[in-house]
């Protein structure tokens, strides 16, 4: 799916640099050098926005800082361009890290405002600190060795720019194939799901800002040989806005989006309509407005969406539960027979949200290798308890132990690393990754692709790599999410209403899967479920939660005639309890 | 009257409703029963236009309103009272009521139109100028119902009106709905308080896993053995629950 | 479904529209100009911080070109104008300059009005050897790095000395404070001022900046007031800004004398609208202007400039009414000077030839401004001798200002 | 001390303009979660209207006639802009499109101003004389802007808590689903909210015309300061915008006084960062703002 975009992008970059040089058009050659520098920055912005979910309106400041630093070191201090290049990138990295700091505290457009502030103030500060930056006069840097045209009309600068831009595109595509890239996208789409997969979103935000700063910094350092002159007026806030515009207009998240976006927004007003002079700004605004009205998902984004709609009817290899269930390797996994040891112990758990007491003094023990059902009416605190155990919510009082060790003060991603897995009420399946990648995210936690589950499913790999999960039916998404959790090698599984939305037949299959996980793989399972039939069918033990308290507990047969349980079936508990 | 035919819907890709057929006639109360997660709320939200159905048809007085925006559905005369006593917390009781009637224009006298409400729920008159967030849960539910009442809909959908209410409050609220229906409104209630609710209902439908398992008049269903077992707690121990 | 279908076709249509536009746009660019027309590139900062001056420059150039074409062109060639907007952004400036010299293959260039932009574009101009006249004040632009570039503006140094001469000799000021906008032009003047004050032994009591288009400068002025300077040096990039400084002075009730620069005089019209003539009187505001745009006796106004004003008003009435006509006249003169240079060089437009001619003969040209001068050492076409202190508020026809010391106050 | 007072008085004057922009953001934000980037240029258009209709020495009569005209004109323009901004949001999940459409609207207004007015900054004279207060002559438009900000604050408060339509708009902000269930036409009210924000900036631009820069490129600075005011005060809170605007005006003026004009923006934006880091929901904001 993404490959044609990558090819298109790289071809666009290469042709735009080589062709004008061959034709000897100094104008287009220069324009496309600038355009490709901007494309590089926009690719980084795209990665930051779409892959890491970070809104930055300040990338122009990073670009400008790298360029200015390179200019100072090379042009004012007289060191070589190499030194300036390195210094420029280093400066961009420092500012990138400064951008990442607020990202730990604020997100979304608020983060946008913070970075926008930096972009507004940046050129003013360049002027204010003129003793260092040469202020308003700017810095002239002549690098004839780099800028003179060589073979086929190409200078070293144009080769460097071409290599950088292509590397940025390739790097972005490659990042998406790596575990880190996958984790980044997971953390951006659903931070809580990410944490339960052992991912620390804050760290990935830092990484994303750093990578973006690196790419933007290289582009900024290359600005110096391309323009030969650095001055504050080139790095006004408009530039930062332009980068953001380009990504959206091209299509946020699409590999080729930045190329198309920059071409349209830079070339249409500045080159194609350049003669219009004062009408140029109008053209810029109209182009952006019309594209958003005609292509709400950006140019490439809307094309991709249309193509995908056409592919909707394509055949897809279903996720075959039987294949997993019959796997020989899997059957050998169950090393230890169920012991009486407690896998999860909750003691005196208390949690309050504003006026609502969600958990009041909950005690719960889940034996290793067993399925423990947790039932109760809506709003009784079941999901809160799951969130507490999986570390997404901090307790007000009491504690949680996993295998005897206190866990309630550890963050979710640490618990995941310790072998705790969970699923969510709506399956957290990541739409913009292939089905296979969705599975790999699980295995990523163990740092290996050499996972028995992946081996067992190897024969599905071609089909699952080519297909995105948005074509999967709900039940299959549920299975996929569960398999992904299995791929993390978690030994304690928390399932949050897994049967919701499944048909009767699908529920039966899912019950088989739960039993398989317990009997063959020796997993401990805490099952929150409204479908009491399912719970009674698979659970070894059941706790009933109501208004934040455990009101009944026992083996299924023991508690079936408990009035609280009867009430659950009829719903009478809701009013009686309050 | 409200007619729903072969309705399918869900949240995103999660199917919740699987071919629902039902009808609600003026003057009658249709009670929809079912365990948590059966899709009752989804059904009401789909009828009211909040969820776009993937298939099927919703008709109001013979007019197709499938996929119509919720505000237009309300204006067409079908009013949903959301679950969890959803009122506008930072507005006063009076303003909440005024908003309920707002779309009907200005030719209505506020006093006349809310009089029947205050008769049933005098507490609302006492707290007329209090902010809704300062009301108790039960009072908020009364307000939510009153807000729907002043709109004078042809069809009223009510999602768990008794949820979170003190026991003593439930009968008057249900009685209010009964009287309301008697004026010629078709009322659909999703309820878990079946002992009480069954008594005021004319028709009953039982939902499980997104489909209607059983439907009939209240009298018929009261006699049905399976309903007695499961929903009225008259059955044997847990056994029938495990197919 | 029909809804979606419609949206998609709309998208496709828009896309096709853009491609067509792009194709037409590209096709519309004129081919090589080795034929008769002589191409004049307007390289101007039409948007961004330098815009109001650039517009006036454009008016002067366009008017001159119209007259020249009506009279048979330059060396028998019709003049064709190609306009480029630098957006006051060096990055764009380099691109536009490349377009002008390599795409449009212009023969001569006019503009810019911002030093930074020409600094960035110099390598391109130098390689193409196109003669150029702009209006920049930075002394960094010397013939060594810009051999074919001439400035119609007095350089910052000359301006600073004229301003300080006025303050010292006429006002007998021994100390001064500087207020300016943070724009490029003003900052380079501030630098020159600091140097010049140091050499003259004048005390600098404070320097403050305001953002271009600021409307309230009271905080900066309050700070400067604490230094109690004899005079306040004002460097503005727009008349409105200058007017707002005066208005803020009034708000504070600080009756300091104000010595302004060339811009304060040239764009005084706008400043008067903002602050009113009383403010000019109250602060005894002076500015620096080209002698050609000044008068002493209201009954003996300089005719060349008045003629220009009449022509400009007939040419583009609305522009003439709102733009600085002295600034326009400067560029009008520039085109005339360039014409003479080309015709005297046998119709050649090579940078080295034209530059050599201008260095040798610019002083001979008599336009509205009579005392042009240039040399191999300085490409500033207007020297300190061409300047005079003026009352910016005593304006008559077309922006002529009364010289300081003429007539009573 | 005297100096500081003067600076603060002027800061409050210009801060009132920021507060008005901030309040106009809130109306739109509360109804749709959109932040309208074009608001700065809309303010400038209000000022331009004053320039076009008021004679060079205006009387008080015409001023009072044209003030509502300016407000209504801008309301109509913003309704159109609102319609266009909401258009792609209905057909796409792309949550960034409004950002582009509003910024593009801002660019287009600036470009049209450039084409018809050139780069000149227009000057408007106030029919009201300046007056002396705490040792400084205060331009009347500052006082009028402050008055207008208070009036709009009161009007908005009344509108959101008394008027039926205003109640409906605040209902949208409080519970979107319940509002729709009550038959409130959300889309129309969102457009109406755009129009109301037009009333605010239209009147603000007209009243403040003598003290703002009416030029093709000055909108960005106003929109940014308005944003900072609204965000510091807490997006959605009119009291926040009022306090935030005055705070930003006074602090940026004070920064110019103490550190110099080149650090004016740096200081007010540092204030923004400081507030966001310490209290992300703003001084008077409620945590977790709702989106469209």
Image: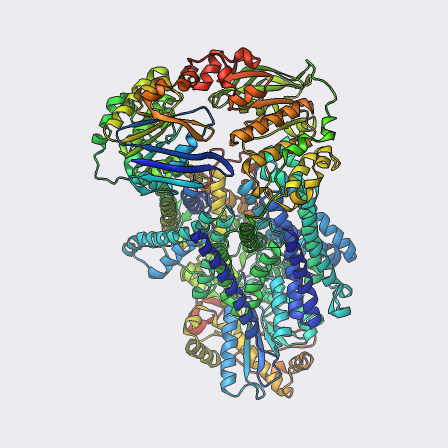
Q: Is residue D9 left or right of residue D155?
A: right
Q: Is residue C6 left or right of residue B111?
A: right
Residue C195 in view (yes/no): no
Which of these two is toward me, C317 or A400?
A: A400
Depicted D260 relative to depicted D112: above or below: above
Q: Residue at x 52, y 84 (%)?
A: C68
Residue C170 in view (yes/no): yes
Which of these two is toward me, C146 or A369?
A: A369
Q: Is residue C303 left or right of residue A121?
A: left
Tally the marks.
0
Colour pattern of the rendering: rainbow
Q: Quadrant of residue A140?
A: bottom right
Q: Percent position (x, y) of residue C276?
A: 41, 60
Q: Percent position (x, y) of residue C24?
A: 53, 71
Quarter of the picture containing the C terminus of chain A is: top left
Q: Percent position (x, y) of residue B140?
A: 36, 25
Which of these two is toward me, A243 or C318?
A: A243
Which of these two is toward me, D16 or A184?
A: A184
Q: Quadrant of residue A224?
A: bottom right
Q: Percent position (x, y) of residue A323?
A: 67, 34
Q: Quadrant of residue B134?
A: top left
């Amino acid at each position: 799916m993404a490959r044609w975009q990558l090819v298109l992008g790289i071809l666009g970059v290469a042709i735009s640099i080589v062709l004008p040089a061959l034709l000897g058009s100094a104008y287009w050659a220069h324009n496309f050098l600038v355009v490709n520098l901007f494309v590089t920055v926009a690719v980084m912005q795209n990665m930051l926005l779409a892959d890491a979910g970070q809104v930055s309106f300040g990338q122009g400041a990073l670009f400008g800082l790298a360029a200015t630093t390179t200019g100072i070191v090379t042009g004012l201090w007289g060191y070589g361009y190499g030194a300036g290049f390195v210094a420029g990138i280093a400066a961009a990295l420092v500012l990138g890290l400064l951008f990442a700091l607020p990202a730990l505290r604020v997100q979304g457009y608020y983060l946008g405002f913070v970075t926008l502030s930096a972009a507004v103030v940046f050129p003013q500060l360049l002027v204010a600190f003129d003793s260092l930056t040469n202020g308003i006069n700017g810095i002239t840097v002549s690098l004839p060795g780099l800028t003179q045209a060589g073979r086929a009309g190409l200078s070293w600068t144009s080769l460097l720019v071409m290599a950088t831009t292509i590397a940025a595109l390739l790097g972005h595509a490659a990042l998406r194939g790596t575990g880190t890239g996958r984790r980044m996208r997971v953390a951006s789409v659903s931070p809580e799901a990410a944490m339960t997969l052992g991912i620390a979103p804050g760290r990935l935000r830092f990484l994303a800002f750093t990578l973006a700063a690196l790419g933007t910094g290289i582009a900024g350092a290359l600005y110096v040989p391309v323009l030969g002159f650095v001055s504050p007026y080139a790095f006004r806030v408009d530039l930062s806005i332009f980068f953001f515009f380009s990504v959206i207009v091209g299509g946020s998240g699409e590999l080729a989006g930045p190329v198309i976006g920059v071409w349209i927004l830079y070339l249409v007003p500045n080159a194609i309509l350049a003669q219009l002079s004062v009408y140029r700004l109008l053209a810029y605004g109209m182009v952006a407005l019309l594209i958003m009205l005609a292509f709400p998902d950006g140019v490439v984004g809307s094309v991709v969406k249309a193509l995908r709609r056409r592919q909707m009817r394509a055949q897809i290899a279903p996720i075959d539960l039987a294949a997993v269930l019959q796997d020989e390797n899997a059957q050998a996994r169950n090393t230890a027979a169920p012991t009486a040891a407690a896998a999860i112990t909750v003691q005196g758990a208390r949690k309050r949200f504003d006026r609502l007491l969600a958990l009041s003094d909950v005690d719960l023990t889940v034996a290793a290798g067993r399925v423990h059902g947790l039932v109760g009416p809506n709003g009784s605190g079941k999901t809160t308890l799951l969130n507490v155990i999986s570390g997404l919510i901090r307790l007000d009082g009491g504690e949680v132990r996993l295998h005897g060790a206190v866990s309630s003060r550890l963050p979710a991603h640490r618990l995941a690393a310790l072998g705790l897995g969970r699923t969510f009420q709506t399956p957290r399946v990541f739409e913009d990754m292939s089905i296979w990648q969705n599975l790999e995210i699980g295995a990523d936690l163990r740092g290996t692709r050499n996972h028995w589950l992946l081996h067992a499913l190897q024969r599905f790999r071609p089909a699952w790599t080519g297909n995105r999960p948005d074509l999967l039916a709900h039940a299959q998404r549920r299975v996929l999410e569960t398999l992904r959790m299995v791929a993390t090698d978690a030994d304690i599984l928390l399932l949050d209403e897994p049967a919701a939305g499944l048909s009767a037949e699908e529920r039966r299959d899912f019950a088989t899967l739960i039993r398989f996980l317990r009997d063959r793989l020796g997993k401990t399972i805490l099952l929150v479920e409204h479908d009491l039939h399912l719970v009674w069918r698979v659970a070894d033990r059941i706790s009933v939660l109501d208004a934040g308290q455990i009101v009944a507990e026992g083996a299924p047969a023991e508690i079936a005639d408990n009035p609280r349980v009867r009430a659950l079936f009829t719903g009478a508990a809701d009013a009686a309890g309050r | 009257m409200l007619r729903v035919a072969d309705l399918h819907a869900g949240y995103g890709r999660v199917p919740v409703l699987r071919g629902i057929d039902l009808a609600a006639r003026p003057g009658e109360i249709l009670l929809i029963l079912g365990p948590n997660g059966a899709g009752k709320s989804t059904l009401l939200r789909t009828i009211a236009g909040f969820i776009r159905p993937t298939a099927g048809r919703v008709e109001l007085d013979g007019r197709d309103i499938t996929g119509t925006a919720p505000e237009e559905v309300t204006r067409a005369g079908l009013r949903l009272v959301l679950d969890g006593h959803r009122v506008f917390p930072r507005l006063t009781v009076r303003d909440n009521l005024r908003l309920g009637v707002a779309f009907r224009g200005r030719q209505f006298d506020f006093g006349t139109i809310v009089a029947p409400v205050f008769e049933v729920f005098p507490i609302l008159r006492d707290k007329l100028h209090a902010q809704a967030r300062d009301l108790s849960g039960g009072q908020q539910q009364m307000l939510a119902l009153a807000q729907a009442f002043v709109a004078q809909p042809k069809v009223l959908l009510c999602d768990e009106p008794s949820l979170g209410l003190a026991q003593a409050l439930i009968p008057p609220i249900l009685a209010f709905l009964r009287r309301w229906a008697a004026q010629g409104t078709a009322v659909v209630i999703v309820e878990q308080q079946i002992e009480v609710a069954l008594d005021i209902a004319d028709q009953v439908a039982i939902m499980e896993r997104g489909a209607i398992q059983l439907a009939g008049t209240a009298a018929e269903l009261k006699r049905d053995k399976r309903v007695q077992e499961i929903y009225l707690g008259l059955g044997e121990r847990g056994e029938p629950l495990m197919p | 479904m029909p809804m979606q279908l419609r949206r998609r076709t709309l998208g496709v249509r828009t896309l096709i529209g853009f491609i067509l536009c792009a194709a037409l746009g590209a096709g519309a660019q004129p081919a090589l100009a080795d034929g008769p027309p002589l191409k004049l590139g307007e390289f101007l900062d039409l948007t961004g911080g330098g815009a109001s001056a650039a517009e006036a420059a454009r008016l002067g150039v366009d008017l001159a070109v119209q007259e020249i074409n009506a009279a048979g062109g330059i060396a028998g060639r019709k003049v064709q104008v190609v306009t480029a907007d630098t957006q006051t952004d060096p990055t764009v400036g380099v691109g536009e300059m490349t377009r002008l010299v390599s795409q449009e293959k212009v023969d001569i260039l006019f503009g810019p009005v911002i030093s930074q932009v020409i600094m960035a574009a110099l390598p391109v101009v130098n390689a193409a050897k196109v003669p150029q006249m702009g209006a920049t004040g930075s002394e960094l632009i010397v013939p060594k790095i810009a051999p074919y570039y001439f400035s119609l503006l007095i350089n910052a140094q000359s301006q600073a000395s004229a301003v300080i001469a006025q303050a010292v000799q006429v006002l007998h000021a021994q100390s001064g404070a500087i207020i300016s906008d943070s724009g490029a032009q003003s900052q380079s003047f501030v630098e020159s001022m600091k140097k010049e004050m140091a050499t003259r032994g004048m005390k600098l009591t404070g320097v403050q900046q305001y953002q271009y288009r600021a409307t309230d400068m009271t905080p900066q002025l309050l700070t400067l007031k604490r230094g109690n300077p004899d005079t306040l040096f004002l460097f503005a990039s727009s008349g409105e800004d200058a007017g707002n400084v005066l208005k803020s002075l009034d708000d504070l009730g600080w009756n300091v004398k104000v010595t302004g620069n060339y811009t304060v005089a040239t764009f005084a019209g706008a400043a008067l609208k903002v602050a009113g003539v009383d403010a000019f009187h109250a602060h005894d505001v002076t500015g620096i202007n080209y002698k050609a745009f000044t008068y002493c006796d209201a009954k003996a106004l300089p005719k060349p400039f008045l003629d220009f004003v009449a022509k400009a008003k007939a040419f583009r009435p609305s522009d003439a009414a709102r733009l600085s006509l002295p600034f326009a006249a400067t560029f009008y003169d520039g085109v005339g000077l360039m014409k003479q240079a080309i015709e005297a060089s046998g119709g050649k437009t090579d940078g080295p030839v034209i530059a050599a001619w201008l260095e040798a003969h610019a002083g001979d040209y008599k336009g509205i401004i009579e005392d042009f001068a240039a040399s191999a050492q300085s490409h500033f076409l207007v020297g300190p001798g061409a300047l005079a202190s003026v009352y910016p508020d005593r304006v008559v026809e077309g922006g002529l200002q009364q010289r300081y010391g003429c007539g009573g106050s | 001390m005297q100096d500081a007072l003067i600076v603060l008085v002027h800061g409050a004057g210009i801060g009132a303009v920021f507060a008005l922009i901030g309040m106009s953001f809130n109306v739109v934000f509360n109804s749709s979660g959109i932040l309208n980037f074009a608001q700065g240029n809309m303010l400038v258009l209000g000022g331009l209207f004053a320039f076009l209709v008021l004679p060079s020495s205006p009387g008080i009569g015409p001023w009072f006639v044209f003030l509502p005209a300016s407000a209504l004109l801008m309301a109509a323009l913003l309704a159109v802009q609102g319609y266009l901004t909401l258009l792609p949001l209905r057909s796409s999940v792309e949550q960034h499109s409004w950002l582009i459409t509003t910024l593009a609207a801002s660019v287009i207004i600036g470009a049209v101003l450039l084409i018809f007015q050139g780069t000149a900054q227009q000057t408007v004279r106030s029919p009201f004389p300046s007056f002396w207060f705490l040792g400084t002559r205060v331009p009347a438009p500052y006082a009028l802007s402050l008055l207008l900000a208070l009036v709009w604050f009161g009007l908005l408060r009344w509108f959101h808590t008394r008027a039926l339509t205003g109640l409906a708009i605040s209902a949208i902000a409080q519970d979107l689903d319940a509002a729709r269930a009550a038959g409130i036409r959300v889309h129309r009210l969102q457009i109406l909210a755009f129009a109301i924000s037009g009333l605010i900036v239209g009147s603000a631009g007209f009243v403040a015309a003598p003290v703002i820069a009416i030029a093709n490129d000055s909108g960005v600075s106003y929109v940014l300061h308005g944003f900072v005011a609204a965000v510091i005060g807490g997006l959605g809170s009119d009291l926040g915008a009022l306090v935030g605007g005055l705070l930003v005006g006074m602090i940026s003026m004070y920064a110019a006084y103490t550190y110099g004009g080149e650090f004016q923006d740096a200081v007010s934006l540092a204030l923004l960062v400081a507030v966001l880091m310490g209290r992300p929901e703003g001084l008077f904001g409620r945590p977790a703002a709702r989106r469209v």
